[in-house]
Structure formats: C-alpha cells, structure tokens
Image (spheres, rainbow, N blue to C red):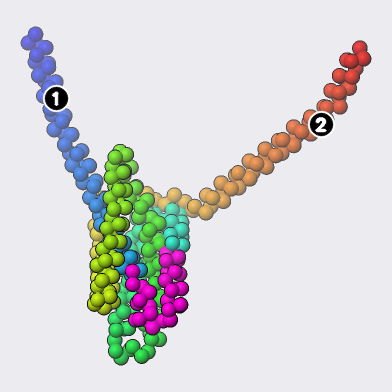
C-alpha cells in the first residue's frame, strides 16, 4: 500500500510538473497575438488614410486643384475604380512573384509616396504665389491619386489573406475573433476618417488633413514592419495565370479524350449492329 501511495504521489508531482512546463507554450500563444495586433493597427491607420482622402476628394479637386466639377467627379470615380482594379493585379503579383508580406510592405511604401505627393500638392495649392498657376499642382495631384490607387489596391488584395496566414495553428474561435476585430477596425477607421479627418479638412485646411493622413500611413508602415521576424510568411506559389492556363488546357484535353472515346464506342456499335441484326434474323428463321 505504501508503494502504491508513493507511486500515486510521484504521478501527481509529474502532472503538476507537466502543467508547469506547459506554461511556456501559453506564453508563446500570447506572443503569437502580437503580430495580429500589428496587422489590425496597420489596417486601422491605412483605412483612416484612404477614407480620409476619399471623404473630401471632390472638394479638394474643385476648390484647391481648380478643376471643373464634371472633371472632378470623373476623377473621383476613376480613382475608386482603379483602386479596386489594382487589387487583382496586386493579388497576382503576390501569389506569383513576391509573396504576401513583400506585397503588403511594398504597397505601403507606394502608399506613403502617393500621400506625400498629394500633401505636396495641397501645400503648393495653398501658396498664394502659385494659386494663379495650376500647371504644377494639378498634375502632381492627379499623379498622386494614381500612385495611391496602385498602393491601396495591392495592399487591400493581400493584407486580409496575410492576416489569415498568421492563424494556421489556431482554432476556429481565434479565426472568428480575428476577423471580427478586422472588420471592426475597418468600421472604426471609416468613422474616424469621415468625422474627424473630414472636419479638419473642411474647417482647417487640406494641409492639416493630408498632413495627418501622411503621418498615419507612415506610422502604419512602421507598425507593420515591427513584427517582420514573427510573421508567418509563405513563398509565392507560382504564376497564377499559368496555373489557370494549365487547368483549362487539362480540362479541354480531358473533354477531347472523352469525346474521342465516345466516338470510338459509337463507331464500334455501328460496325457490329448489322452483324447482330443478321444473327437475330437467322435465329427467327430457325
């Protein structure tokens, strides 16, 4: 009995020791949340930047860049449409060549360049000496919108999937929590942009508004880069267009083979059908 109690006591101590040894894995799980927090903060700051530009873009083009109302409306629609179109291009580049981390990081750098250009356009348009000569700041503003649409589209195509890559070893509850917080981050950022940033741009100047947005996108780039060594990054999976071509080619070849096989069966039936009918007639005569 003493040996059994001693054995039970040793097993209890081993279980307690194993529970103590399990604590580092819990800390590793807590440390794994830090890259997710960096991604969510990046999403908030980037969405504030994009919606802050889009909120009063029409007023900026009409009042500051001295463009006509019809042209300004067309530019706003072209800007948003090109941003959505570039999502396709950014996704193809990430999957085929650069990988998602490099695609997001590169798109943020492009983003910083574009916001810096539109901030410079606002500075020059506010200058009294250059106000009568829009030949400089109008092209800068249009080029800035083109650069921002490229960066925003490439970023939007990859940041959601890159956030999902960090959850490979987690359960479904963590997946739901992360994407709930992800879309809440977008909603909070849009509220801040359309209320606070839009108010600053209208009541103060566009220099103040675009200056805040430039600081936001620079901060987003810095926060995203902090966890570079902790991110789960996958290499590019290959040229997606080539994969699509190979899939279509294989499907067409399979369909062609099935059609050829069906034709051979039909031809074989046509050959043996007269012989079979003759044998049936002979059997009836007998």
Could you say which is closer to the camera, residue 196 or residue 103? 196
Q: Say what secondary structure mark 1 lies in.
A: helix
Residue beneath disc 1: 14
Q: Pick whichever, 259 or 48, lies toward us.
A: 48
Question: At 36% across and 73% down in the image, what residue appears?
Answer: 57
Residue at the image position 33 percent from the left and 65 percent from the top? 51
Q: Please tell me in which quadrant of the rendered image residue 257 appears.
A: top right
The extreme top residue here reads 1
Front position in the image: 84 or 147:
84
Q: Is residue 106 magenta?
A: no
Residue extending farthest right: 285
Position of residue 226 measured from the top left corner of the image (x, y, whole percent): 24, 57
Quadrant of the drawing holding the N terminus: top left
Q: Position of residue 70 (x, y in %)?
A: 46, 77
Crowding near the residue tagged with mark 1, few <14, some 14–19, many ≥20 C-alpha atoms within 10 Å: few
Majority SS type along the magenta span = helix
Query: Residue 139's x, y, as percent?
Result: 41, 80
Classify residue 196 as left or right of residue 98: left
Q: Residue beneath label 2, please?
A: 270
**Whether residue 214 is visible:** no
Asked whether residue 115 is in view, the answer is yes
Mark 2 vs mark 1, CA separation in Å: 79 Å
Residue under the image location 54 percent in, 50 percent down: 244
Asked whether disc 2 touches disc 1, contact meaning CB atoms under 8 Å apart, the reply is: no
Q: Earlier in the sequence, mark 2 or mark 1?
A: 1
Question: Which segment is the magenta one?
Answer: 55-83
């Amino acid at each position: 009995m003493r040996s059994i109690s001693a054995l039970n006591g040793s097993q209890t101590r081993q279980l307690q020791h194993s529970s103590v040894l399990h604590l580092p894995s819990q800390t590793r799980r807590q440390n794994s949340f830090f890259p997710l927090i960096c991604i969510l903060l990046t999403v908030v700051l980037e969405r504030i930047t994009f919606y802050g530009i889009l909120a009063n873009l029409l007023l900026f083009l009409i009042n500051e860049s001295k463009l006509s109302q019809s042209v300004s409306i067309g530019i706003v629609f072209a800007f948003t449409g090109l941003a959505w179109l570039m999502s396709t291009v950014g996704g193809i580049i990430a999957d085929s060549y650069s990988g998602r981390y490099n695609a997001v990081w590169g798109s943020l750098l492009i983003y910083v360049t574009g916001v810096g250009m539109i901030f410079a356009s606002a500075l020059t348009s506010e200058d009294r000496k250059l106000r009568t000569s829009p030949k400089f700041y109008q092209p800068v503003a249009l080029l800035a919108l083109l650069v921002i649409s490229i960066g925003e589209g490439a970023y939007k195509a990859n940041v959601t999937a890159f956030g999902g890559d960090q959850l490979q070893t987690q359960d479904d509850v963590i997946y739901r929590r992360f994407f709930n917080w992800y879309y809440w981050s977008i909603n909070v950022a849009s509220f801040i942009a359309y209320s606070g940033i839009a108010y600053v741009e209208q009541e103060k100047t566009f220099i103040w508004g675009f200056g805040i947005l430039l600081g936001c996108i620079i901060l987003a780039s810095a926060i995203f880069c902090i966890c570079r060594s902790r991110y789960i990054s996958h290499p590019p999976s290959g040229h997606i267009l080539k994969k699509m071509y190979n899939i279509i080619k294989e499907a067409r070849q399979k369909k062609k083979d099935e059609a050829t096989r069906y034709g051979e069966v039909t031809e074989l039936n046509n050959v043996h059908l007269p012989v079979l009918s003759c044998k049936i007639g002979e059997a009836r005569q007998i």
